[in-house]
Amino acid sequence: MEKTKKTQTPENCPKCGSALGSVMETKSGKQFQRCSTGSWNAQTRSVDGCDFIKWITPEPKALDEKCPKCGEALMLTVTKFGKKLKKCSTSKWDPDTRTQSGCDYVEWIKGVTEQLNEECPDCGSALVMYTSAAGKKMKKCSTNQWDPKTRASSGCTYIQWQK
Ligand SMILES: [Zn+2]
Ligand SMILES: [Zn+2]
Ligand SMILES: [Zn+2]
């Protein structure tokens, strides 16, 4: 069996031609690459060297969910500001005519909850993995519910923050 290794060709800065640095992440979960010749100077609060920054926009991910408007599959997209939204996979943006075609269903999400195959150490119910819009993860008990009316949570309070 021959293993095909994906060699990523290093990308160069469009401003000065130097190699780009490694992918970094802001506090809010946005990913970017800075030109390797540039570095942040905390004293002058400006960039020494080349100030090129490439923001990385993650690819949309197909979801196992149907659009409530038209029944087609939903996609999960992340804006370059780190905000997540679900939108209909039939939605297309045409850059030539600057119009949108297809279904216009959009749902902004604050966080994603995934079912886990683990039991809560406190009460034995299933655990869920909650990922906030900023990319922070925590495991919590599936019996824990937030009631927006009473502004109180009910159920088991088990929470484990992930690193
Ligand atoms: Zn550069
Ligand atoms: Zn739709
Ligand atoms: Zn529990």
Image (cartoon, grey):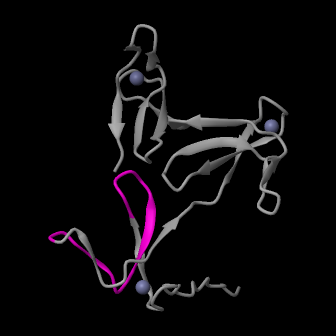
Q: Position of residue 121 (x, y in %)?
A: 36, 29
Q: Position of residue 95 (x, y in %)?
A: 77, 61
The foreground one among 37 and 160 is: 37
Q: Position of residue 162 (x, y in %)?
A: 36, 46
Q: Is residue 61 magenta?
A: no
**Residue shown at 63% from the left, 60% from the top:** 59
Q: Is residue 34 magenta?
A: yes
The foreground one among 125 and 159 is: 159
**Residue shown at 45% from the left, 62% from the top:** 31
The quarter of the image holding the N terminus is: bottom right
- Give the left or right position of residue 108, taking residue 39 as reference: right
**Residue shown at 43% from the left, 24% from the top:** 124
Q: Position of residue 129 (x, y in %)?
A: 48, 38
Ligand 1 shown in quarter: bottom left
Q: Is residue 141 above or below residue 23?
A: above
In this view, which residue lies farthest toward the top? 150
The foreground one among 95 and 40 is: 95
Magenta part of the protein: which range? 25-43
Q: How many marks?
A: 0
**Residue shown at 41% from the left, 37% from the top:** 139
Q: Is residue 53 above or below residue 119?
A: below
